[in-house]
Structure formats: C-alpha cells, structure tokens
C-alpha cells in the first residue's frame, strides 16, 4: 500500500480537554507530538455546559494547574463569571467554578497549542492503531488515518471523548454524529477491538440552547459572580482576573412542565428502549427527574451564557432526549421562557468507551505497551476529569518513551489520584463523575493547597518552571515559620482581650495561652486575633489562609494523615504484574476473578476492588510473603 | 501495626484459658491490667523474655482473677512480636471479662487467623506451611463472618440496620448538598437537627455495647438443635439433657435472639440448645414446632440431634425432615428403646440421614452416656466446628459497636460546636463502616448510590 508516512515520538488522538493536556505535556517535555482532531475548529470545545470547575471539579483544575497543566490558565483568560462554591462550608469543600466564553476558551487553547514547540496539529480521523511485537510484547508502533496516511510513533494517547461510533438521539431521530453535529469517528472502534481492546457503550446528554433575545429575564432571579474573583491558576496574577462579569439567571420548572413530560413519556427514546447506553445518574434528563422524584414540585433551571460572541443561552437542568415538539413546549412552560426560541435541541449521545479492568494506574493499557488512554474514553464524564487524565497520560507516555519512571498519583495525594484509581480499580456502569465524597482524605486534598501538594511533582516531571517552584517553596517556608511562631506566641488575659472574647461569644482566658490555641476555637480567626499579636509578620493572604486552616482543623487533619500512613503501608506492598492468581490458594472464586481482571498494582489497591474481602487480602499477603521467601532462597542458591 | 488480643485456647469450662496479647504495645497493655502482688511498681515491660510471673488481673481496684503472665520478647515469640500471655483459671465468664478489660486498655480484637498470619508474615512459620496458613485464614474468616451475622438476634440486627440507614441517609444528604450546592441546601437548623437525630442512635449503640459487657450476649457452647417430627420425644430428650447434669442450665430470654436458648453441660462440653421455647411450650401430644422452624434453627446450628421414634414406622414428616437436613454434624437419637423397635438404623439411613446413631430412651435415661461420648468424639475429631470463633466475633462486634458510638459522639460534638458539615461526615462514615462489620456489609459505593437515589442532582 502506498501512502503518506511521517514519524513522531507520540500521537494524541482527539483534541478535547484530555487530548490538549496530553499533547501539551508531551510537547513541553520535548517529545515531537502530533495531535489529531476531526475538526481543528473544535479544539477544546465545550459541547455541553459552559463552565469549568464546580464542586470537586474545581479541585481537579487546581491540581492540574499545580502539575503544570493548561486548563486553569486558559479559563482565567476566558471566563465570564466566577464563584467560589460552598464558602459557608469547610475549606476542604470550597470549590471554584467559572462560566466560560466557549469560543474564546477554544480559541485561546488552540493558540496555546499552536505556539508550543514540538507540537503539530492535524485534522484527520484516525481509523487504525498499528500494534506490533516490540521486545516480545505488543506495543503501539503507528496510527493510520482514514485516508491511509501512516504516522510512526513510539507512544500514543487515545482521547476520543464521545466520538467513537457516536450516535445522537432525540425523539425518534437518531443520527450517527458526534457532539454538536460533528463527524463521529466510525472506524477506530473496529481497529481497537482487533487489537484486543474491549469496549462498552455509555450514554450522556445535553440540554437545549435558546436565543437570549427571546427570554424575559425579569421573571428570573439574577445570579452574579464573586467580587473579588479568585483565579484558578496559581500562576495567574489575581489582579488580572478582576473584571466586569456576566450574570446567569435562575428559573424553575412547574407543574405544567411536569405534566407535558409525563404525558409524552412514551415518546422518549430512553423509556421506549431505543437508547441502550447507560446514562449517568448525576446528570439525569428532565424527564428522568420528573419520573424519579414525583414529589418534587419544581426543579431549578440555570440559564447561562454560552459566550460574548452569541445570544445563545444554555439551560442547565433541562437535559432531554424528547422529540422536538415536546422540547419546545417544555421550554415554553417555564417562567421567563414563554416565548423562547430553541437554537439547538437537547439530545442524548451514545458512544464507545473502554470496558473496565484494562488500564494500569499509569493510564497505559495493560495489553498494549505505549498505548495510553484518557478522558471520556476511560469512562469518565466532564471536562475537568478529562483534562486531569490527559496530563497524566501525556506525562506517562513521555516517560515511557524516554524509559523513565512513570507518574502514579496516590489517593492521598490528590483528587486526580482518586479519579484514576477509581477508574482503574472499579467496575463502572455509568460515566464517572468526580465527587468530593469519593475522596476519603479530602480534608488534606483542598483546592487551596493543591500547589503545596503537587507543584514539586510537576517540577520533578519537568512541567513546572524554576520560577514557579521557587514561589511555592517560599510560600511553604513562610507557612511553616508562622505556624511554629504561633505555637509559642503568648496571648495575655488583658482587658482588651477579654472584651474581644466576650464580643465573639468565646469564653474568657484564665491565664495566658498560646495563640494557636485561640485560633483553634471555631468562633475566632487568625485575622481577628491580629491586634493581640504584635509580633505578627506581614504575610501574603494565601499564607495566612494556610496557617489558619492548618491550625484550626489540625485535629482532623492529623487524623487523616494517620489514616494515610496506614494506607500507604498497604500501597507499598507491590504485587508482581504477572502474578498468576490461579496459583494462589484459598482465594474465593469471585475475588480471584476480580483480581485477574483488574490486576491491582499493590495490596492497597487490591483491597479496594469490590468483591475482594479482607480475608482475601490476608491470603494474598501470605502468598506474597511465601513468593518473596522462595525468590530469596532461590537467589541464594545461585553461585 | 496494631496490638491485638484474643483468647488463644478453646473456650471450654474446664482447664486453663490463655489470653494472648501481641504487638508493639503488648507490655504496656498488659501492665495496665496486671499487678504483681505486693510490688505495685513492678512492670511486665521490665521482665525478661521466657519468664513467668504470678499476679492479679485488676479492674477498677478489684481483683478479677489470679493469673500467670508469660512474657515473650520479639522476635522470640509465636508471632515474632512482643507477646504477653495470661493463663487464667476462672472459667469462661472470667476469661471473657479479662479479655474485654485488655481490649478496653488499648488492644484491638484479633481478626480470625490473625496470630497465625502475623507469625507467618514475620517468618516464624515454615514456608511449607504457607498453604495451610492461607487455608486457615480463609476458613476462620468465612466461619466468623457467618457466625457474626448469625449471632445477632433478629431484633439487634434490625436495630443495627436501622441505625446504618439513618447514618447513611444523613451522610448522603450532607454530601449531596456539598456536591451540588446550587440545587440543595441544608439550612441553618440542620446541625442541631442532626445532633438531635443522632443522639438516640448513639445512645442505642452504647446500650448495645453495655449488653455485650454484661455478658448477656455471651453464648458459648456447641449450638445444638433438636429436630424431629411431632411426638418423637423432643421434649423428653430435652428434659433428660437438662435434668441429668444441671451444671449450668440458664435461660437467656430474648436479648440475644427471639427464641430461648438453654445451656447444658454434657461431660466436658457445653451444649447450647437452641430454639427450645417451642418444645417447652408444646404439650406432649401436639408439638407446635413447625417443619420450617426446625430447618431455620438447624441452619444456624453446629450440631443437629435428630430424634426418631423407633416404636413407630417412619412417617412422611420424618422423611421430609431427613431429606432436607442441612449438611451439619448429625447425631440420630433412636429414641424409645424401652419399647419394641419398629424402625431400624437402616430405615433412617435410607431416608437420607448420614450421621452417627445412638440408641436411647428418654424414659429410662439409657444411652445418654454414649451420646456424650459420641459428641465428645465428634468434637475431638474436629467434625463439630464449635463456635469459639463466634465468641471471638462477639468481642469484635462489641469493639465495632463501641467505635461506632464514639464516632457518632464526635459527629454530634462537631455539629454542636458549629464545625462545617464536611468535617463530621468523616465521623459519620466511620460509624457506618464500623456497623457494617456487624452486619457483614462493606461500604463499596453505598454513599454515591444513596446520594443519587434520594437527591435530585445536577444539570
């Protein structure tokens, strides 16, 4: 066969949020990289909600930024409105969320990609992955496009999003397209199956968009952003994000809306069985909500701008796969939307993604060397989840090619670690969304300390500059010094102090105490105690914030750190990759099957696999010890 | 590494019982409960390995028992860790009291097979034994798991399940609001409402743990069930068993289960006769124990005594019962040997009974010595798996209940102190997980499932 041929270090398939981060990581680490997309105009497209961040997703973006990723910087440049959610709750669940100008976001990311050395963008549908034996093991060696061009590579990252064998559905209309009517990737699934990759089918959906000129905002509640705005990126100067913000609007469905939906349920492809894919429970369609929560009299609908370039508005809360006419009537039954014109219909989308149990914690396929996967292809949902996997897949693909140690983030290091561990060890039957309750050590994994947790990792990987790491190290030094100082700085029971304590509803001092003890009281704050702390140095706001959190919640934080230590001991016990579980006696059958399928990297991971009991873990520990002793004994026998 | 403790000998009424404490804190735990007579300043921690010391176990200033304490220093012990063993003489009840004291003073209850596991992992057990060690861990865990669930009475089990429900629902409510703050909000009053809701749950758990303390849940012995068709003579056999050697016949009314259990001493063994209420209440003519109920009791038993009336031919009831008996150690009592036998051992075997046969007469008392020897032999051969593991499970259950109560106390405290909700969900989940150990359930994805089930999330 004749055709065009080129050679790169790595290929990235798909230029969504995962693909962009993967390609940037690869190229920035010095590897020649080609990024494939079905449409250059849809790079970093947001086909669903027009925002970045939100509860736990904001954490992912912060962590990604600390590692040296792009999403945080890009949204800081292109946001329309920004809010810190859960401000009234504990610091661990504060989460940033920003409304994005979709077009600006996409254009800005494209510009960043175009200006990155070693990175080539190519519009083409990849239809085939070439897998050959390298050193006795299957390894990716090239990818081919529909037109027959071959690109020889040493590694690749597959980030196909929802494009693989995609089908968009509403009412009785079913079209073989990707999101937003873009071309689906119709060939690659077959090639993957041929290479031994098992696929499954997932479903998700998006609400209708309407013309802002046809909306009566006077009937809705205005939703404004925070002043001042907190930037996502640790590299962004906070001054640069203080700007005029665009409001969002809140309205509600009503009994009439629900009646229309109920009366037309038989026309929904979800209920009639036309859609086979499994949909996410956290993002139900409006018809699903009406059926599952019949007692709820109304559901919130957030009306959000898609960008400054358009009047189009996004109707958050109104996902649907109902036919045209029902969608129209549903929209118009809602206060403020009586005359609304739909610009784009809501639709459900089905796509191929990876069946569970095939990935290593590095996001490399166990069966194919050098083949990394990221984003919705791995069964996740959301831009942020995708981007977070993208950077890890990109870094690891680069390390693999260079023959260096790959990056595995632990559950105690980051939400990214939790996300990947869950994707790798769990059986998921719906697209996986990050949730703060999934992070068992979340008091340690705060969005405010993502830099302290991960900057060093990003630096070690090669994605964080000297200047940025110096900034983080300086911050850490100031925090430690101030915490130490407060342990020995004494607050005297002066007249003023007692009066202040009374005013704050706090009990008075019987004698002098150390300042950190006072900060620990829920009703007092570090800032409020400044007048009684004459030796306090002048410190940046982010340092003060860390000092206060570390002291105030020190008891809980210490408890979680102890749990982490226990978990780390189990994580430290590695399981050989090629362990033949059929040789391990006394494992229950279910446990054995699960272990064979998921091949945990260590004992900690094994224990998290559903169906593997503590007794199975003990049995495994005994076997590993036996194995180890035998190996040592055999080693001794050799001359 | 946790310091663990358990009763290391079979829980028999006779002889010496040994409580083993193993782990880095073994000496400090032991010293908190052990006193050298006349030398309050002496510590086991200062004693050399392989030494034996006479002394007292003391609880709140009261002497609980006289014991010998054996000191082993790491790595020269069974587990290769620091170990203290108490040899106690005071019988089952006192031994269990001592173990609880040890657990209350910093040790954790040993998991099934845990001493052996540690011994192996620390290199004390030969490599060739690895497979046996794994099998032991497997068997003991499986047994403890089923025993643990079986041991809870219907009422206790339901109560624990309900507590878990409350805890999971509230955790899901809080988490849903954290994950989707724009759609769900808890309201200002929530923390105090939560504290009010959790307080009775916590108090219920403390009461439950106290019941363990009082030993009312203690139910050691070979759990034995009498099965037989109506009128076969179950109540007569029961009377003989209870009347012959009335060493420790106690009624334990419905606190542990909804039925009555009786404890019977038979030679060196203790039989725990289960589900005797029906037999007692029933008149001799019409016995009210239904077939179904017999099966339910038999499924939980360590030993089945099948009572066959040899003076009559095998009835349909006999055949139904015999065919469906669970695969448990079985002794068939060929009763009414004082009358002319009509049914033979071969008849009963043909009907599906595969066990040991003993000819008895409840009327004359004939054959009951042989019955004792038969059961003793089955026990010695290891065919009866006595619920000593279940007794161990008891302590682990109590430990779990106490941990759950402590976590709820922390959650209530945090709610009342005005800490943010996301702090006390940690305690709520700890309580939920601890109670799951009682009901044999793990956490898995319960929380996410409950959030989605109960709360309407997202875009």
Image (cartoon, rainbow, N blue to C red):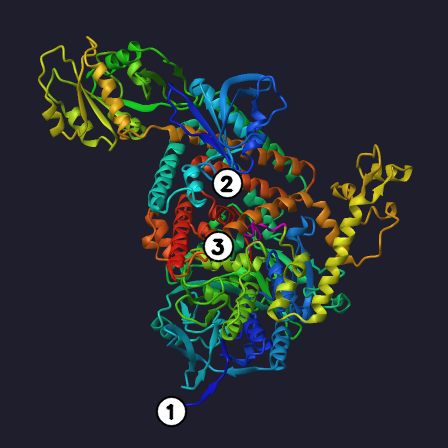
| Crowding near the residue tagged with mark 2, few <14, some 14–19, many ≥20 C-alpha atoms within 10 Å | many
* Callouts 1 and 3 in the same chain: yes
From the viewer's side, name the closer residue of A211 and B95: B95
Residue A418 at what x, y percent from top left?
54, 56
Q: Is residue A347 visible?
A: no
Structural crowding at the residue carrying mark 1, measured as other residues with C-alpha within 10 Å and reported as few (<14), some (14–19) or many (≥20): few
Q: Magenta region: which residues?
A: A435-443
Q: Quadrant of residue A278?
A: bottom left
Marks 2 and 1, how far apart at CA: 62 Å
**Label 2 sits on residue:** B433
Rounded to the nearest angstrom, the CA distance separating label 3 from label 2 is: 24 Å
Q: Chain letter for mark 3, please.
A: A
Specify the subunit that label 2 lies on. B
Is residue B134 part of the magenta span, yes or no? Answer: no
Residue A96 against residue B122 in the figure, above or below: below
Say whether disc 1 or disc 3 marks the residue closer to the N-terminus. 1
Residue picked out by circle 1:
A2
Using residue A487 as the reference point, say whether residue B87 is left or right of it. left
In the rendered image, residue A265, in percent from the top left (x then y), is placed at 43, 56
């Amino acid at each position: 066969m004749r055709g065009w041929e080129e050679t790169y270090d790595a290929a990235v398939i798909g230029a969504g949020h995962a693909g962009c981060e993967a390609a940037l990581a690869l190229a920035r680490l010095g590897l020649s990289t080609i990024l494939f997309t079905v449409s250059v105009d849809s790079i970093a497209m947001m086909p669903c909600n027009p925002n970045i961040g939100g509860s736990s997703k904001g954490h992912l973006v912060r962590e990604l930024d600390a590692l040296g990723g792009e999403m945080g910087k890009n949204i800081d440049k292109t946001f329309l409105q920004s809010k810190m959610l859960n401000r009234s709750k504990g610091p661990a669940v504060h989460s940033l969320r920003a409304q994005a100008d979709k077009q600006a976001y996409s254009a800005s990311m494209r510009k960043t990609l175009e200006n990155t050395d070693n990175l080539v963008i190519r519009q083409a549908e990849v239809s085939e992955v070439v897998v050959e034996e390298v050193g006795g093991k299957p390894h990716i060696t090239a990818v081919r496009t529909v037109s027959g061009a071959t690109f020889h590579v040493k590694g690749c990252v597959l980030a196909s999003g929802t494009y693989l064998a995609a089908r968009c559905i509403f009412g009785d209309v079913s079209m073989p397209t990707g999101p937003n009517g873009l071309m689906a990737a119709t060939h690659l699934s077959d090639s993957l199956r041929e290479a031994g990759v098992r696929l499954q089918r997932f479903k998700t959906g998006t609400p209708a968009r309407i013309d802002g000129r046809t909306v009566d905002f006077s009937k809705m509640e205005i939703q404004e952003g925070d002043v001042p705005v907190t930037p996502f990126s640790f590299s962004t100067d906070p001054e640069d994000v203080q700007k005029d913000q665009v409001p969002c609007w809140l309205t509600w469905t009503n009994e009439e809306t629900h009646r229309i939906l109920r009366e037309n349920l038989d026309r929904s492809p979800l209920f009639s069985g036309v859609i086979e894919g499994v949909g996410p429970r956290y993002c139900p369609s409006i018809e699903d909500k009406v059926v599952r929560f019949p007692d709820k009299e109304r559901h919130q609908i957030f009306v959000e701008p898609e960008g400054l370039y358009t009047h189009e508005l996004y109707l958050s809360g109104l996902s649907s796969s109902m036919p045209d006419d029902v969608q129209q009537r549903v929209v118009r039954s809602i206060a403020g939307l009586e005359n609304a014109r739909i610009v784009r219909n809501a639709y459900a989308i089905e796509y191929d993604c990876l069946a569970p149990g095939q990935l290593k914690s590095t996001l490399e396929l166990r069966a194919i060397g050098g083949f990394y996967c990221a984003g919705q292809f791995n069964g996740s949902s959301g831009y942020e989840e995708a981007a977070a996997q993208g950077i890890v897949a990109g870094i690891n693909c680069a390390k693999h090619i260079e023959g260096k140690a790959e990056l595995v983030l632990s559950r105690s290091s980051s939400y990214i670690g939790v996300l990947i561990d869950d994707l790798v060890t769990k059986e998921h039957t719906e697209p996986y969304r990050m949730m703060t309750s999934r992070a068992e050590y979340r008091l340690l994994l705060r969005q405010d300390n993502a830099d302290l947790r991960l900057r060093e990792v990003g630096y070690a990987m090669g994605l964080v500059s000297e200047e940025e790491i110096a900034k983080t190290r300086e911050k850490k030094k100031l925090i430690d010094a101030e915490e130490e100082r407060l342990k020995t700085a004494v607050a005297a029971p002066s007249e003023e102090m007692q009066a202040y304590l009374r005013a704050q509803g706090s009990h008075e001092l019987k004698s002098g105490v150390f300042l950190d003890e006072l900060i620990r009281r829920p009703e007092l704050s570090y800032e409020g105690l400044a007048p009684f702390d004459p030796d306090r140095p002048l410190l940046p706001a982010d340092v003060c914030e860390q000092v206060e959190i570390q002291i105030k919640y020190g008891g809980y934080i210490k408890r979680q750190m102890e749990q982490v230590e226990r978990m780390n001991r189990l994580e430290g016990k590695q399981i050989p990759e090629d362990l033949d579980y059929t040789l391990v006696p006394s494992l229950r059958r279910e446990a054995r099957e699960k272990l064979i399928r998921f091949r945990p990297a260590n004992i900690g991971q094994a224990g998290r696999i559903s169906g593997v009991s503590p007794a199975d873990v003990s049995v495994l520990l005994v076997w590993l010890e036996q194995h180890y002793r035998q190996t040592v004994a055999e080693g001794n026998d050799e001359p | 590494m946790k310091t663990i403790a358990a009763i290391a000998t079979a829980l028999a009424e006779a002889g010496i019982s040994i409580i083993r404490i193993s782990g880095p804190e073994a000496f400090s735990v032991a010293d908190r409960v052990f006193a050298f007579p006349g030398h309050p300043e002496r510590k086991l921690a200062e004693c050399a390995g392989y030494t034996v010391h006479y002394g007292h176990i003391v609880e709140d200033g009261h002497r609980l028992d006289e014991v010998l304490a054996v000191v082993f220093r790491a790595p020269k012990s069974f587990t290769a860790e620091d170990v203290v063993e108490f040899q106690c003489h005071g019988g089952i009840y006192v031994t269990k009291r001592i173990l609880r004291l040890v657990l209350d003073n910093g040790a954790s209850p040993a998991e099934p097979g845990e001493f052996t596991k540690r011994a192996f992992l620390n290199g004390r057990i030969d490599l060739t034994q690895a497979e046996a060690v794994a099998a032991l861990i497997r068997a003991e865990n499986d047994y403890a798991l089923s025993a643990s669930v079986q041991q809870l009475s219907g009422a206790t089990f339901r109560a624990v399940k309900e507590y878990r429900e409350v805890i999971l629902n509230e955790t899901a409510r809080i988490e849903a609001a954290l994950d989707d703050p724009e759609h769900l909000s808890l309201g200002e009053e929530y923390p105090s409402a939560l504290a009010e809701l959790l307080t009775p749950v916590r108090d219920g758990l403390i009461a439950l743990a106290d019941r363990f303390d009082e030993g009312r849940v203690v139910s050691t012995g070979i759990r034995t069930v009498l099965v037989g068709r109506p009128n076969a003579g179950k109540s007569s056999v029961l009377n003989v068993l209870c009347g012959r050697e009335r060493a420790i016949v106690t009624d334990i009314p419905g606190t542990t289960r909804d039925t009555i259990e009786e404890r019977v001493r038979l030679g060196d063994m203790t039989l725990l006769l289960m589900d005797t209420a029906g037999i007692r209440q029933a008149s001799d003519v019409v016995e009210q124990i239904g077939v179904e109920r017999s099966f339910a009791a038999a499924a939980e038993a360590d030993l089945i005594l099948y009572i066959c009336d040899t003076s009559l031919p095998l009835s349909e009831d006999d055949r139904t019962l015999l065919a469906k008996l669970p695969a448990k150690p079985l002794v068939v009592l060929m009763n009414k040997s004082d009358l002319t036998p009509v049914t033979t051992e071969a008849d009963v075997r043909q009907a599906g009974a595969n066990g040991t046969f003993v000819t008895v007469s409840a009327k004359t008392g004939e054959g009951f010595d042989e019955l004792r020897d038969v059961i003793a032999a089955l026990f010695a051969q290891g065919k009866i798996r006595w619920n000593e593991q279940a007794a161990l499970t008891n302590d682990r259950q109590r430990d779990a209940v106490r941990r759950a109560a402590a976590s709820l106390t922390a959650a209530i405290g945090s709610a009342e102190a005005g800490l943010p909700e996301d702090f006390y969900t940690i305690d709520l989940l700890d309580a939920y997980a601890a109670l799951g150990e009682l009901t044999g359930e793990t956490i898995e994805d319960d929380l996410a499932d409950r959030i989605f089930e109960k709360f309407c999330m997202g875009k």
